[in-house]
Image (spheres, rainbow, N blue to C red):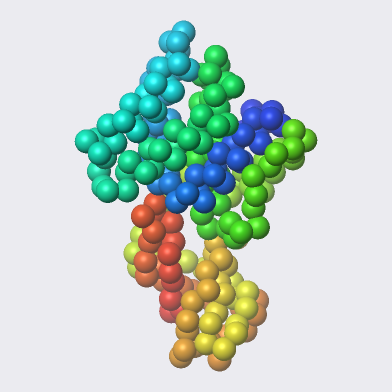
Amino acid sequence: MLTTESLTEAESQLAHNLAITLVKEDTDVNEVGKVIAYLRSIVEQPDAGWRFFSYLKTLVTNGRQIGHSGRTPGYYRSIEGACNQYLQSQQANAQTILKILGWAMRLMRYYKVSPIEEMSISQSPQVEQISERQAEIAEVFQSQKFEIDQVLDATVLAVKGNRVTYEMLGTIKLTEKEPRKAASLKEGQVVKVKITALKDDGSIKSVKFIE
């Protein structure tokens, strides 16, 4: 398992920038996972870095033929563009690329349920390393598999009119319309909610109060 200590400050910045860039471009986390799987399979080869970037170029060129949906070519373009921008300087060290990409994918799952507007690409060479909190949350999303009708504990963060903001698993925040229940809920109250919809990447899209 990767730890926060396995990333230098520069590598931490690259992982953050990669994740933010890909999330803002609505890139499918699963496609990033496939790219990582390919690199892992060749990482011991002496020219692994060069082969990795060639592979990304091939994906973009042949995206329409090998893609599973109409959006897949766009995912490939986003992944290639982000990797060229942030990882090209690491081409000689495939192990480092693999490490950074692995953390970027974990952080993507975290950032997809965080207020993305508050995050930005860091240009400074002086950047805080991925915090223990971020690492813990990223690990949750790496292993968590959500399902429709799954019941979760949720804390009521705010009630405004018929809209209730819930927090689940310590980090997932969603605001839902609860016309029948909002008036009876109070901030800080812990309730049960049911997952009613999932996003394409498997993260939670919406929930509903049940008790």
Q: Foreground residue, 185 or 37?
A: 37
Q: Is residue 156 above or below residue 21?
A: below
Q: Is residue 88 above or below residue 128?
A: above
* Residue that protrudes farthest toward the right in the picture: 126
Residue 209 x/y as whole percent: 46, 78
Res. 129 image quadrant: top right
**Residue placed at 43% from the left, 79% from the top?**
210
* Residue that protrudes farthest toward the top in the picture: 46
Q: Is residue 69 visible?
A: yes
Residue 135 x/y as whole percent: 62, 43
Q: Foreground residue, 109 or 181?
A: 109
Q: Foreground residue, 52 or 148?
A: 52
Q: Is residue 154 visible?
A: no
Res. 33 image quadrant: top left
Left/right placement of residue 190 relative to residue 207 reads right
**Residue placed at 57% from the left, 89% from the top?**
161
Quadrant that contains the N terminus:
top right
Left/right placement of residue 195 relative to residue 170 reads left
Left/right placement of residue 171 relative to residue 142 reads right
**Residue placed at 62% from the left, 78% from the top?**
158
**Residue placed at 53% from the left, 74% from the top?**
175
* Residue that protrudes farthest toward the front in the picture: 61
Residue 20 x/y as whole percent: 57, 46
Q: Is residue 206 above or below residue 74?
A: below
Q: How many numbered marks have been drawn onto this rendered protein structure? A: 0
